[in-house]
Amino acid sequence: MDTLFSIKDVIAILKKSIVWIVSFALGGLVIAGLTIYLLMTPMYEMNTQILVTQTSENDNAISQNAEVQANLQLVNTYRVLITSPRVLNQVEKNIDGAYSTEELTNKIKVTTEQDSQVMNITVTDADPAMAAEIANKTAIAFKKVTPQVMKVDNINILSKASVTKTTSPVSPKPFLIMLIGLLGGALIGVIVAFMRHLLHNTFKEEKDLEALGVPLLGSIGKLPTHKPSVDKKKGEFNEKQTIS
């Protein structure tokens, strides 16, 4: 079964439409750049670490290994407690109501490493200083509320979030988005090139007929663009004019 395009045809179409492809690729790159800098807001992430320490000071009451396992089980409970209204209401007050409890819930993410007693409080916001403040206020509020709710005081803040000169947004990612725009535009250009070829129904060269397997019976050359001169006095053609 014959294929729609041979490799030779594909290469010929791409070469013939290279201007279209490059134009669409550059267009996609420009659109991606404008989208990044005009429509997307840079977002920053700030992180605070909390350590769940041992809950018992009596080594004879429980083995150290069993105590660590008990603390690991508490970590899942603490993850829920951090984003609970009890804690976030306190955070909302500490940041002077800049965000509501519901908004804080969407901004705060709590993660833990496998078999680790360390919890990471990550806050995402358009303002890095605000993100750092929310992360730190959440850790402080959690440390304050935990003894009241869990009847234990085993929370230590390992590190506080702070804005530095190297702080950079985590989104959007300009290079990735612009690369997608460039490749997407080039792909659209290729599609347009093949569509133009498929919808093309005129013949401009002899090879267009030969590609269809139609025998060429003859051809008409280009007619001269100049007109023979006329002797205005005699009203006749000048015999010296050469007629092709």
Image (cartoon, helix red, strand yellow):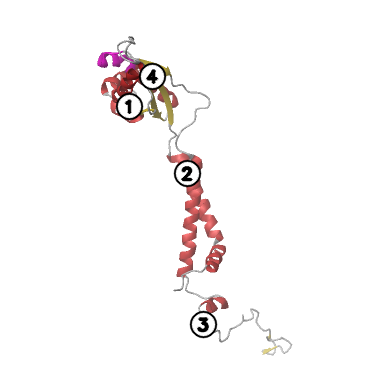
Q: Is residue 52 on the magenta stretch?
A: no
Residue at mark 3 to residue at mark 2: CA–CA distance: 48 Å
Task: Reply above or below: 17 against 152.
Answer: below
Q: What residue is disc 1 on?
A: 104
Is residue 71 something one can see in this rendering?
A: yes
Type of amino acid at the residue the image marks with label 2? Ile
Q: Give the secondary structure at mark 4.
A: strand
In this rendering, position of residue 142 left or right of residue 24: left
- The C terminus is located in which quarter? bottom right
Work out how far the residue at label 4 is from the one at label 2, CA to CA, in angstroms.
37 Å
Q: Label 2 belongs to which residue?
A: 177
What is the crowding at mark 3: few (fewer than 14 residues within 10 Å), some, or many (at least 20)? few
Residue type at mark 4 is: Leu
Residue located 26% across and 20% down the image: 86
Q: From the image, state whether disc 1 or disc 4 is nearer to you.
A: 4
Q: Mark 1 to mark 3: distance in Å?
A: 73 Å
Q: Which residue is mark 3?
A: 214
Badge 4: few (under 14), some or many (20 or more) residues near its Cα, within 10 Å?
some
Instruction: Name the residue at the right extreme.
Output: 240
Mark positioned earlier in the residue sequence (4 or 2): 4
Region rendered in magenta: 141-152
